[in-house]
Image (cartoon, rainbow, N blue to C red):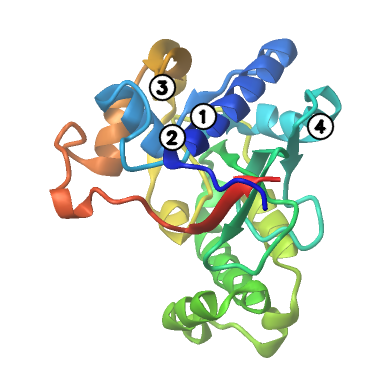
Amino acid sequence: MPKQLTLEERKEYGMRVLDEIARVCSEMGIRFYLAYGTLLGAIRHKGYIPWDDDIDIWMFRSDYERFIREFNDRASSGFRLESYLSDGYPYLMVKVMSTETSVREKLLKRMDWLGIWVDIFPLDYVSEENTKAIDEMVRLEHRRWCALFRHSTIIGKAKLLGYNLLQHDTTYHDFLHDPADFTRRIHAMHASTVPTDLVKSPTSENSIRNLVYPSSCFDKALEVPFEDRTYPIPAGYDELLKRVYGDYMKLPPVAKRKLDKHLVDVRLR
């Protein structure tokens, strides 16, 4: 039976995926930035948050869409990108993964193509047009969750029902719909590339409504240590981290320093 991976081994495979993304981005002339908990880890821990194994990055929309189109043709052996351009894809963000590894999620039924991944989120300029569309985007996100119901484990189904999906104008047909179609529609509504003073990333209902950042935070990039490498972060990282985490240098209580066990089986193929 293939070897189960330790947390440290999982982190190293994540770094290999990030290295490959960085290589392809350099080849394509695309800028990316460490994002969310990965950005926090870079600033507070000079690497992964000790109790986390995720890697998240941002790209501006035009680079993001080009990266999706071209990555698999440029990638080295052992890496693959999966996105909402494929039917049945269940996620809102794009994933680049290691094909040398196999993972199983707690909330979704087994998907044999999954491997240890890096999540890539688009950055969209906030225009008056897509601000007005926020309520519709949130409704589409609830409908996407309905479409995930038949792809979910028993635990996932219970969580979805607890999300009060039926209170958000969803219908029976949404449960039979392709989740990737809702994702494509959300991204199409969100995808503004005309520069404005604000940017946001459609990653969840909360971020669709609330997480808006000054676009000036991304005007420049800084190279900072992350584990034993260096990667780019937005020069305005302090403003970004305060908006997401508040007093971000303060460690959470010990009881909350736990790995999010959304992956229940991580091994080599």
What residue is rendered at 41% in x and 57% in y?
206
Image location (x, y in percent) of residue 73: 86, 27
In this view, 85 is above or below 262: above
Q: Nearer the viewer, mark 3 or mark 1?
A: 1
Q: CA distance from mark 4 to mark 1?
A: 21 Å
Residue with the mark numbered 3: 216
Closer to the chain start, of discs 3 and 1, is 1
| Residue with the most extreme bottom position | 172
Is residue 96 rendered to the left or right of residue 73? left
The amino acid at mark 3 is Ser
Q: What's under tag 1, amino acid-wise? A: Glu
Amino acid type at image mark 4: Asn
Disc 4 to disc 3, how far (Cα)? 31 Å
User: If the image is split into quadrants, where does the C terminus sit?
Assistant: top right
Mark 4 closeness class: few <14, some 14–19, many ≥20 residues within 10 Å:
some
Q: Position of residue 138 (x, y in %)?
A: 52, 65
- Per the image, the residue denoted by label 2 is 8
Above or below residue 194? Residue 127 is below
Contact? badges 2 and 1 (CB < 8 Å): yes
Report whether 125 appears left or right of 110: left
Q: Amino acid at mark 2?
A: Glu
Q: Nearer the viewer, residue 64 or 2?
A: 2
Q: Which residue is mark 4?
A: 72
